[in-house]
Image (tube, rainbow, N blue to C red):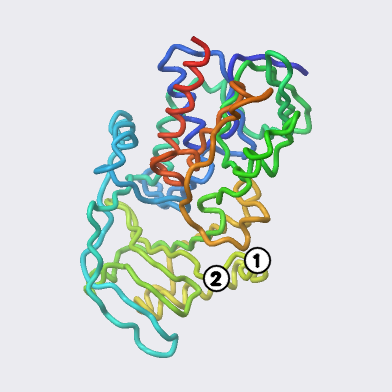
Amino acid sequence: MMLTARIAIVGGGLAGLYAAYLLEQKGIHDYVLLEAREGWGGRIATTPSITESSALDRFDLGPTWFWPDYQAQLDRLIQSLGLERFAQYEKGSMLVERTPHGAAEWMPGYTYTPPSMRLVGGMGALIDAVRRTLPAHKLLLNHRVQRIRSEGQHVELDVEAAQQALTFRVESLLLAVPPRLAATTIDFLPELPGPLLQAWRATPTWMAPHAKYLAVYDEPFWRAQGLSGEARSACGPLGEMHDASMPGGSAALFGFFALPAALRKGIPEETLRLHCRAQFARLFGERAATPRADFLKDWAADSWTATEADQSEVAQHGSAPPSSAAEGPWRGRLTGIASEWSPQFPGYVAGAVEAAALGVGQLLRQKT
C-alpha cells in the first residue's frame, strides 16, 4: 500500500514529537510520525504510576535531569506546557563504598551549580504533554522503517506495520533516531555518502550502554539518617546512586550499573535485582532491602536503542556528526534531528529539543 505525506518523521522520542509540535505551530499539517516501539518517548522511559491517587507518582528509567540555567530552550518548552519542576535532593552526606565487607565512608555531599532539576511525573510527563498537542491520527506506533529510498523528487519509506507492508512517499524526511542506530538498522538506497555513513556509525548512542535500577519506598528513611541518597561504589553492582523521590509522592533510590553491558547480558534479571537490593541494604540500612516496587531497565538490551557496537562502549556525550548529506541524491532530502545531532547538548534531553528545532528550521528554509 502506498501512502503520501509532505514530511515523514522517523522516531517517536522527544526529538520526533517536538519536530511535529514545531510543524503544527508553523501551520504545516501534512506529515506523519513513525515509531517502531509500542509506546512514545524513545530513550525517555518512565515507570507506571506507583500510586492510584497520583498519576504523577512516576520515576525515570532513562534521562532524569536538566539544567534550566543553561538549557533555556528546553526550559521554555517545559514552562509553556505547564509542567512542574523541582531540584534534585542533595541535603546530607553521601556514601562511598570501597569494599563490600566494610562500612561505607560518609563524606560531604556534592552541591551542583547550577542545580540539577527534575520534572514532577518524570521526563515522561514531558513526552505526554507534547504528544497531547498533536493530532493522534498522524502518530503511528509499531511502524518500523526498514528501508529508505531516494526516488527523484521524493523519498520512499518501506515500513513494516502489524505484519503489513506499507510504503510512504514524502518530499522530506526528519530522522529522529540516533545516528548509529539509523546507519545500522535502516537500509538507505542509494547508500549514504561514505564519510557521512562512517560518521554516523562512529557516533555513540547516549544511554545505549547504560542500565538503571530503581527501588520505591513509602518514605525516604535515609534522609532522617542525614544522608542525601547519593552514593558511589567500587564494589557494585551499582556504581553511582541518587535519591529519586517524587515530591508529594513515593520515595525512591536509583543507581547506574557499573557492570559493563557484556557482563550484564549473562546474568538473569532477578539475580541483578537481588544484588542491587543487597547493595542498597549495605549502604542505607535493612529497610532498603525490601522496596515496595523495583524496576530495572537495561538499555543495552533494548534493540530500538543499542546496536552491537554499543555493547562494549563506555557511555559518553560525543560531538555531533553531520546531520545531512552535502551532495548527491540525499542532499536536501534527509536531516538528522535526534539528540546526538545537537551542537550544544548532544545526547541530552535538551539536545533533542535543539536538534529538532534546527532540523525543522533547515527543512523549511529548503522549501522556501
Residue located at (74% from left, 27% from top): 158
How would you rate the neighbour count of disc 1 (Cα within 10 Å): few for under 14, some for 14-19, many for 20 or more? some
User: Residue 267 location, x and y as percent?
Assistant: 64, 71
- Determine whether 213 is above or below 17 in the image: below
Q: CA distance from mark 1 to mark 2?
A: 10 Å
Q: Amino acid at mark 2?
A: Leu
Residue holding disc 1: 265
How would you rate the neighbour count of disc 2 (Cα within 10 Å): few for under 14, some for 14-19, many for 20 or more? some
Q: Amino acid at mark 1?
A: Lys
Disc 1 or 2, which lies upstream in sequence? 2
Residue located at (63% from left, 56% from top): 301
Q: Quadrant of the N terminus?
A: top right
Please indicate whether residue 325 sits to the left or right of residue 87 in the image.
Answer: right
Q: Nearer the viewer, residue 12 or 111?
A: 111
Q: Nearer the viewer, residue 120 or 238?
A: 238
User: Residue 263 location, x and y as percent?
Assistant: 62, 71
User: Residue 7 location, x and y as percent?
Assistant: 58, 19
Q: Quadrant of residue 333?
A: top right
Q: Nearer the viewer, residue 282 or 201?
A: 201
Which residue is the extreme one toward the top? 368
- Determine whether 194 is above or below 309 in the image: above
Residue located at (27% from left, 42% from top): 70
Q: Quadrant of residue 322?
A: top right
User: Residue 360 location, x and y as percent?
Assistant: 47, 23
Residue holding disc 2: 259
